[in-house]
Image (cartoon, grey):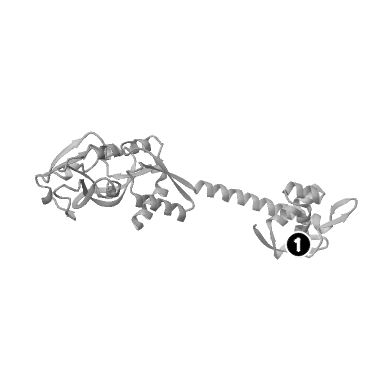
């Protein structure tokens, strides 16, 4: 309930507001309805409360004001002279309060945002899902809703208005076509291989370790730094025409094969292959987003940057 604080005195039968009394919005509404209905029972029905509860509110209100608002009789309910005078003041108070409440509620609704976050299950790091859950809990005015969209379709989905943002490696400017990009981190490559691979026992790979080794990469021509460019002169790179979905990962069966990923996604591959990190720069990873939601996505980006 909302409390109003004002002072009310009676002067020659006229009620003037000039001091401090405390009431709640329900008292005020019950008084106005009772005056307009001419009946406590009808006012109670309109308020969806019992007549006893409404009468109790009126009694408390009269006690707080220090004068009677109604004359009760067998013939009905009538306002006292003080009640009649106070009724017009009460209506003004209620109209000011109700108008202010509605305007504030509309503003709050306008400022409450939903962010549709494009992700692909089994291809999205679990710790990022945890961060989004924490963000939703700590930022009640913004709701992040996850949308299942394949990695290769996420940017197009933002362009088409089906999503508001995603996290990917930095794309070329012509691919953004008006979308925004906020850098989250500078990534490094990780390499996925079977346990029998010659490099499977290493804790960290360098460019020198890759000399003469065959590396498979997905075909992502939109990236500012493609896998081929990132590993140029370091390994023999072969590009395949599919993304790293579950089926594609299962096809890497040779002990000599390994494939390269951005290190931020290492955990999504570690259940099927041995994943070895490297010190080889992989370029920027960040939020690709619809600029209409920039203010809200910037808050999500900041939360990620502080907690990742």
Vertical placement of 119 versus 5: above or below? above
The answer to whether any part of residue 41 appears in the image is: yes
Residue 9, image x, y percentages: 76, 64
**Residue at 70%, 61% in the rendered image:** 23
* Of residues 47 and 237, the one drawn nearer to the viewer in this rendering: 237
Q: Circle 1 sits on which residue?
A: 60
The answer to whether any part of residue 220 appears in the image is: no
Total of numbered circles in the picture?
Answer: 1
Quadrant of the snapshot with the C terminus: bottom left
Q: In which quadrant of the rendered view does residue 26 lie? A: bottom right
Residue 212, image x, y percentages: 9, 44
Relative placement, left or right, of 80 versus 298 is: right
Q: In which quadrant of the rendered view does residue 27 lie? A: bottom right
* Of residues 155 and 249, the one drawn nearer to the viewer in this rendering: 249
Vertical placement of 86 versus 252: above or below? below
Relative placement, left or right, of 228 versus 185 is: left
Residue 2, image x, y percentages: 64, 57
* Of residues 288 and 178, the one drawn nearer to the viewer in this rendering: 288
**Residue at 24%, 41% in the rendered image:** 223
Residue 38, image x, y percentages: 82, 49
């Amino acid at each position: 309930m909302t409390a109003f604080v004002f002072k009310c005195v009676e002067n020659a039968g006229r009620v003037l507001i000039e001091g401090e009394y405390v009431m709640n919005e329900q008292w005020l509404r019950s008084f106005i309805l009772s005056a307009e209905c001419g009946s406590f029972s009808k006012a109670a029905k309109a308020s969806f409360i019992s007549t006893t509860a409404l009468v109790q509110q009126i009694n408390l209100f009269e006690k707080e004001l220090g004068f009677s608002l109604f004359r009760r009789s067998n013939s009905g309910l009538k306002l006292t002279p003080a009640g009649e005078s106070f009724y017009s003041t009460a209506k003004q108070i209620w109209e000011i309060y109700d108008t202010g409440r509605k305007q504030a509620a509309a503003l709050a609704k306008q400022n409450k945002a939903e962010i549709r976050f494009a992700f692909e299950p089994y291809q999205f790091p679990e710790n990022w899902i945890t961060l989004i859950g924490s963000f939703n809990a700590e930022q009640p005015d913004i709701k992040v809703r996850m949308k299942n969209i394949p990695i290769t379709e996420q940017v197009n989905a933002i362009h088409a208005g089906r999503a508001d943002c995603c996290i990917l490696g930095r794309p070329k400017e012509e691919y953004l076509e008006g979308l925004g990009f906020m850098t989250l981190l500078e990534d490094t490559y990780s390499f996925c291989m079977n346990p029998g691979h010659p490099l499977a026992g290493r804790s960290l790979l360098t460019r020198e370790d890759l000399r003469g080794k065959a590396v498979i990469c997905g075909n992502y021509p939109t990236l500012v730094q493609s896998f081929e460019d990132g590993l140029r002169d370091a390994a023999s790179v072969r590009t395949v025409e599919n993304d790293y979905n579950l089926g594609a990962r299962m096809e890497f069966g040779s002990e000599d094969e390994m494939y390269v990923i951005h290190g931020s996604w290492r955990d999504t591959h570690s259940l099927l292959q041995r994943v070895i990190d490297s010190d080889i720069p992989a370029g920027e990873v960040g939020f690709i987003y619809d600029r209409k939601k920039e203010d809200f996505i910037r808050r999500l980006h900041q939360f990620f940057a502080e907690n990742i």
